[in-house]
Image (cartoon, grey):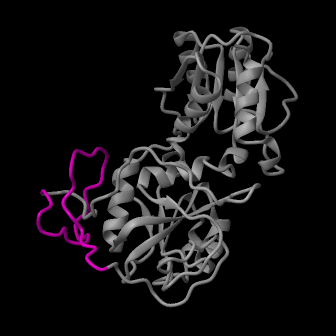
């Protein structure tokens, strides 16, 4: 199978017109008529990623973040972008990036984040009963809708001990909300029914951009338990949050990466919580008891995007070998 066929499959799933005007998604480096020897999937393209592609026998790298955002006036090895381009060309490795077009695609980045939380994306249409809680029998609330009041836990919705093993850094810090009885020592206060497994994309979403997703948790949960769930599912030791909500969290607005622009829309839509990767300091002000903000890091919020790319290629390009990169490209170190 040729590289062009892989590119076509990716662009069918996340058409380039969905990308933002400043973005540079699509083919970055290479010739598309070459046969695919293997595909390395990653978040960022670096020299180390190209080295991993070489070691795995891959002649195609598919990333989320583009290597090339701007034109290069020279290629002389003066910075990591130039050196990465030189290495990729020298070893006949093509590079494709699916960035904001994948962010806004049905089943894309934000749907993957919802899947990791065990939350169900809500298609457009309908009203809500309470703050972010879908009314019985009513279609779910779309982004941009309105709600009134405050959601209450469903009858009998009680946090239950986790059934199985978890990984990551979900242990509440000192002073964090207490864990209900029945949970093992150090376990987050997370209700049952939050699998980190497969998610089927619901029907009912319109064609075009879906820049962020409103999703429903399986059951309402207190804010401290929600933050613990997010930390555990994304393997983060800490999250940037505003003051914990004093009402249950039922619906979550989700936008990976840097998403200051979504906060006001999420509030207008009645979301109880908002998950993203980055927010500016001053944007946190003024939303106490309005919405639970949970910022987990840009890399951390999008770390599972390679799974989306893998699943597209496996479905539409059978027989093509895919590898999720083992190289950690996060430039931020927590000390």
Residue 263 % position (x, y): 61, 71
Return the x and y of residue 87 as percentages of the image width and height.
68, 15
In the image, farthest residue toward the front: 137
**Between residues 213 and 137, which one lies in front from this camera angle?**
137
Residue 79 in view of the camera = no
**Closer to the camera in the image, 187 or 203:** 203
Taking the magenta stretch, the answer to whether it contains residue 177 is yes
> Looking at the image, which residue is at 44% across and 44% down?
198
Residue 71 location, quadrant: top right
Q: Is residue 227 left or right of residue 254?
A: left
Residue 283, above or below 43: below
Q: In terms of secondary structure, what is the magenta stretch mainly?
A: loop
Classify the position of the N terminus by image quarter.
Answer: top right
Magenta extent? 155-184
Residue 79, placed above or below residue 304: above
User: In the visual, does 98 lie left or right of 174?
Assistant: right
């Amino acid at each position: 199978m040729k590289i062009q066929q892989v590119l076509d499959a990716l662009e069918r799933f996340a058409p380039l017109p969905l990308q933002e005007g400043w973005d540079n998604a699509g083919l970055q480096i290479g010739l598309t008529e070459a046969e695919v020897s293997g595909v390395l999937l990653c978040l960022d393209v670096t020299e180390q990623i190209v080295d991993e592609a070489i070691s795995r026998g891959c002649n195609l790298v598919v990333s989320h973040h583009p290597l090339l955002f701007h034109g290069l006036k020279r290629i002389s090895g003066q910075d990591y972008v130039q050196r990465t381009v030189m290495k990729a060309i020298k070893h006949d490795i093509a590079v494709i990036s699916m960035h904001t077009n994948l962010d806004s695609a049905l089943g894309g980045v934000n749907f993957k984040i919802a899947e990791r939380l065990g939350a169900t994306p809500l298609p457009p249409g309908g009203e809500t009963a309470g703050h972010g809680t879908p009314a019985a029998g009513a279609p779910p609330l779309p982004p941009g809708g309105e709600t009134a009041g405050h959601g209450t836990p469903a009858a009998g919705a009680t946090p239950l001990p986790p059934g199985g093993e978890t990984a990551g850094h979900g242990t509440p810090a000192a002073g964090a909300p207490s864990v209900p009885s029945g949970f093992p020592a150090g376990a987050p206060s997370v209700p049952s029914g939050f699998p980190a497994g497969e998610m089927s994309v619901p029907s009912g979403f319109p064609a075009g951009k879906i820049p962020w997703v409103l999703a429903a948790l399986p059951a309402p949960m207190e804010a401290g338990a929600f933050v613990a769930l997010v930390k555990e599912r994304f393997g983060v030791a800490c999250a940037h949050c505003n003051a914990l909500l004093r009402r249950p969290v039922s619906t979550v607005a989700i936008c990976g990466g840097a998403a200051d622009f979504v906060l006001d829309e999420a509030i207008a839509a009645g979301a109880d919580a908002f998950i993203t990767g980055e927010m500016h300091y001053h944007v946190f002000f003024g939303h106490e008891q309005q919405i639970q903000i949970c910022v987990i890091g840009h890399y951390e919020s999008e770390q599972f995007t390679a799974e989306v790319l893998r699943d597209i290629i496996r479905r539409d390009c059978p027989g093509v070998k895919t590898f999720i990169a083992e190289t950690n490209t996060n430039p931020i170190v927590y000390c």
